Amino acid sequence: MIAIDDRTDHHVLRTAFGCFPSGVTVVAALSAESPVGMTVSSFTSVSFDPPLVSICVRRSSTTWARLRPAGAIGVSVLGAHQADVCRALAAPGDDRFTAGCDGQFDAPSCPAGALRSLDPPRAAERTIQTHRRGPRRSCGGG
């Protein structure tokens, strides 16, 4: 049993949280220069009425800083067959779309062939400790 309080070692907690299996999504958009996005495993459905999903990203993320002002941000649910795409888009650097999407970018979502793609408008954003939580209204699916 791990006691969770302000003294809990972050590495121990990260390992414990990593034991919980979750799916992986890609949060992406087309910026003026090129596609920008990242993998996000902290994605959850919040409500069906109104349709609402939530993603959580680290406040210090430089990718989120580039995604945040985008007018349309897509959320794509990756399948097991897309493990290579997931690893490429999780890697640091600006060239992750060349390696990860192999030129197959369905704006505002990436990659083409995802299990489901959502095009949710931004509903709200909250800063909670080290992360930003962005509930988003879910509109559509593919």
Image: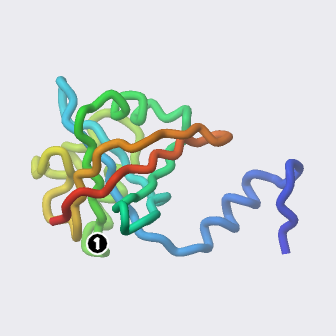
Give the x, y percent position of residue 26: 32, 54
The single residue placed furthest to the top in the displayed view is 32
For residue 50, side relative to residue 82 (left or right): right
In-front residue for pair 26/99: 26
Instruction: Say left or right for 106 vs 127.
Output: left
Please say if 115 is above or below 95: below
Residue 69 percent location from the top left of the image = 33, 28
Residue 108, above or below 81: above
If the image is split into quadrants, where does the N terminus sit? bottom right
Give the amino acid at mark 1.
Gly
Q: Nearer the viewer, residue 15 or 127?
A: 127
Q: Residues within 10 Å of mark 1 (few under 14, many from 20)?
A: some
Of the pair 31 and 91, the residue shown nearer to us: 31
Q: Which quadrant of the view contains residue 75?
A: bottom left
In the figure, is residue 31 to the left or right of 132? left
Which residue is found at the position 37% from the left and 66% from the top? 49
Q: How many marks?
A: 1
Kindly identify which residue carries mark 1: 79
Residue at the far front in the pictured view: 49
Q: The C terminus appears in which quarter of the rendering?
A: bottom left
Query: Where's residue 82, x and y in %?
Result: 26, 67
